[in-house]
Image: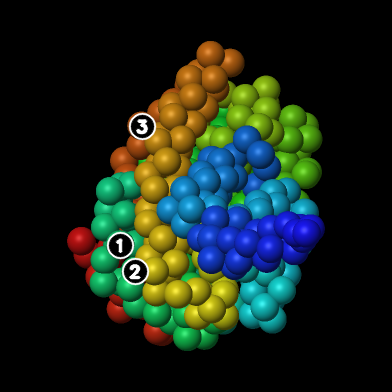
Amino acid sequence: MTFNWKLPAVAVTVAALLTAPAFAQDITLKLGHLANEDNPWHMASVKFGEELSALTDGRIAVEVFPNESLGKEIDLINGMQLGTVDMTITGESLQNWAPMAALLAVPYAYKSLEHMDEVASGEIGDQIKAQIIEKVQIRPITHFARGPRNLTSNRPITSPDDLNGLKMRVPNVPLFIDVWKALGANPGPMAFSEVFTSLQNGTIEAQENPLALIRSASFNEVQSHVNMTEHVRSWIYLTIAESTWASLSEEDQGAVMEAASRAQAYERELFNESIAADRAYLEENGMTFVEVDGAAFQAKAKDAVLANVSDEIKPIVEGLFAE
């Protein structure tokens, strides 16, 4: 008598596979963004993926695409609305759909990083997020800080009176142009790629950007002072497509939010380290940091800011200035 052991063995193996816990990844989320691999936003995105994988026993993986390799910011937002992209990092660009997103980067609205965090995490932040979910169909799950913008020049500037027609480059944003005019400067839009040469040959005398960009663009070679105007403090959101969010179980949604919270804490550590490192580098390479009369700048900028914001957010901005 012979026995066929092979068939029962196969049956047992199949049964084991069907009843075993699903530890292999079931979902892969595509997260595209514009930053490079050295940027804290990218490192925090990778951290988010690692934490989410750990929290879900590997069932949910996150594939991160830096350097616009999955598309530019607006393309990614459109992809999330269409269901072809799961996640991105985005900010005030969302005001194209949700006007309250303009609050993410209003000049002189936030007096400190702590004040900004308080607003982003509070009632106003909840209103912004609710409108983004409704109007854009993407869901902010945490926020990351952005380095405050500072004015560079070849002389110290401590108050608006020191600007005195200073020829400076600003992005092609009407709000920025009008604010700097109100402060007493002579601002003009210019492509960022032209700024270094224009500073070098004297076409312009100053520009404004976060320390990280001042460093990476080597503006220390053509500017001697960083005036700590900190005129724009802003944040940016890590977001997930609402369609992707709705497809997740309540348990997995909780895991996403916990992973996002951990990624935010990690990003803040990196952010603080990068601000300190950028300042140290610029000082070591010849730049002098100048403290300014922030209250004087804010007071003189107020009317120009209010004239440029929408009626929907104007009462909120007025309240922020009054705090």
Q: Compare residues 149 and 130 and report the one nearer the observer.
A: 130
Vertical side of 312 occupied by 181: above or below: above
The amino acid beneath tag 3 is Glu
In the rendered structure, which disc, 1 or 3, sits on the residue that comes first in sequence?
Answer: 1
Q: Within the image, what quadrant is residue 266 found in?
A: top left
Q: Secondary structure at mark 1?
A: helix
Image spot of residue 50 (x, y percent): 52, 46
Q: Which mark is residue 125?
A: 2
- The quarter of the rendered structure image containing the N terminus is bottom right
Q: Within the image, what quadrant is residue 195 found in?
A: top right
Residue 229 relative to residue 23: left or right = left
Residue 273 relative to residue 82: left or right = left
**Label 1 belongs to which residue?**
121
The amino acid beneath tag 1 is Ser
Q: Secondary structure at mark 3?
A: loop
| CA neighbours of label 2 inside 10 A, class few (<14), some (14 to 19), many (20+) | some
Q: Compare residues 114 and 50 and report the one nearer the observer.
A: 50
Q: Which mark is residue 291?
A: 3
